[in-house]
Image (cartoon, grey):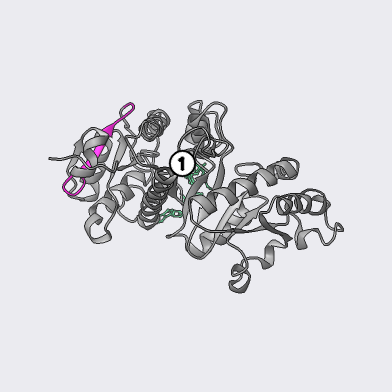
Amino acid sequence: MPRSSTPALALSLGEPAGIGPDIALLAWESRAELRLPPFFITGDPACLRARAARLGVPALVRECAPEDAAELFADVLPVVPAGPAATATPGVPDTSSGPAAKAAIDAAVQFVKSGRASAIVTNPISKAVLYDTGFRFPGHTEYLAHLAGDPPPRPVMMIWSPELAVIPATIHVPVADIARTLTRELLVETGRIAARDLEHRFGIARPRIAFCGLNPHAGEQGTIGREDEEITRPAVEELRREGIDARGPFPADTLFHPAARKGYDVVVGAYHDQVLAPVKMLAFDRAVNVTLGLPFVRTSPDHGTAFDIAGTGRANPASLVEALRLARRLADRDRELSEAAPVGEDAPLLADGRPA
Ligand SMILES: NC(=O)C1=CN([C@@H]2O[C@H](COP(=O)(O)OP(=O)(O)OC[C@H]3O[C@@H](n4cnc5c(N)ncnc54)[C@H](O)[C@@H]3O)[C@@H](O)[C@H]2O)C=CC1
Ligand SMILES: NCC(=O)COP(=O)(O)O
């Protein structure tokens, strides 16, 4: 059988005791109806066979090489074995979970970097389980940047949905540390990366980037906290001087209602829950986590491991389905841009080496 010229997407197994295996199986089961782009899973095939049997999903799990996945996808669930056996019971991670989840990410990244996968989609990991097994990165976002290159690019987390797209400038930072982690340099870098990737990867000609204040009422002209005047406003002004359509700082409490959402393409928030809560309220089953700033495409469902429903058949694969679709779209656009780009010494390059 001829091999497809477009590599499949690599989907990492995620936390084996979470809903990653469930949603991967359920998405694959609806592949024809949903016209899903072909993907293969990196991880322990035995874990997926056991979960398919438990859920009653008639999936034929087939071990294969990445190159064969696109052709096999219509008939079987392609799995490229990676990492140790994942022995955990659904809902109950054990000591195999951390190494199995990490090895699945490592393999997916290796395949996308070598051109054997078009993009990577990651199933949720349990941060606590990984930290317990020696993982020293806050999450996928920073770990993927570490694997992407030396020096690592600055990664930016964006949660994207048709209703709302948001970026937390600080990510997995304790609330007590947010104000000192939020710097002008961080906001400027985040704005630049957002502007660049929204234009190049998402095709938005001049993205409008709204910055949230940190304090109530965006600090009320410095009377309720100084950060918005001393950090966020100068960052917005610096970005505007560079030609980026940055706006704000705006009070967070009035930035997410329907009329306000018409005024920007993405919101950069000061911290995780300030912007992830609104997007998950509006679009929990449609939103997709995208890492900007990487030399390859990475998406993920917006939710976590959902240990409480793993292995029950109640997990909704909709966010994973959107993550797969978006990964395909972004990877196709990356490929079109690189094919159209001039070659040779004069070709302009982005900071990470991608064609501008
Ligand atoms: N990209 C990633 O790797 C992410 C990992 N996490 C990790 O997930 C773990 C659990 O986090 P939580 O805050 O409990 O959030 P969670 O998203 O796992 O669960 C929150 C609630 O939503 C439900 N839920 C989540 N996804 C669902 C789906 N697809 N279908 C139906 N119901 C669903 C769960 O059953 C639970 O009641 C943590 O260890 C966290 O670090 C959280 C977010 C993203
Ligand atoms: N709350 C979002 C989240 O935890 C995702 O983090 P990451 O693993 O994609 O870095």
Position of residue 344 in the picture relative to residue 103 (left or right): right
The residue at 36%/30% (across/down) is 114
As drawn, the residue found furthest toward the left would be 1
* 322 lies above or below 260: above
Locate residue 294, reporting x and y percent. Answer: 51, 39
Task: Return the residue at label 1.
Answer: 342
The residue at 48%/54% (across/down) is 202
As drawn, the residue found furthest toward the bottom would be 259
Of residue 132 and residue 24, the one placed in the foreground of this image is: 24
The residue at 21%/37% (across/down) is 68
Q: Which residues are magenta?
A: 73-84
Q: Amino acid at mark 1?
A: Pro
Task: Say how many tags the image has.
Answer: 1
Locate residue 91, reporting x and y percent. Answer: 38, 43
Of residue 99 and residue 218, the one placed in the foreground of this image is: 218
Name the secondary structure under disc 1: loop
Of residue 241 and residue 232, the one placed in the foreground of this image is: 241
Position of residue 111 in the picture relative to residue 239 (left or right): left
Locate residue 295, reporting x and y percent. Answer: 48, 38
Position of residue 225 in the picture relative to residue 211 (left or right): right
Residue 223 inside the magenta-drawn segment: no
Locate residue 153, reporting x and y percent. Answer: 56, 35
Quadrant of the image containing the N terminus = top left
Q: Is residue 280 visible?
A: yes
Residue behind label 1 places its C-beta within 8 angstroms of ligand 2: no
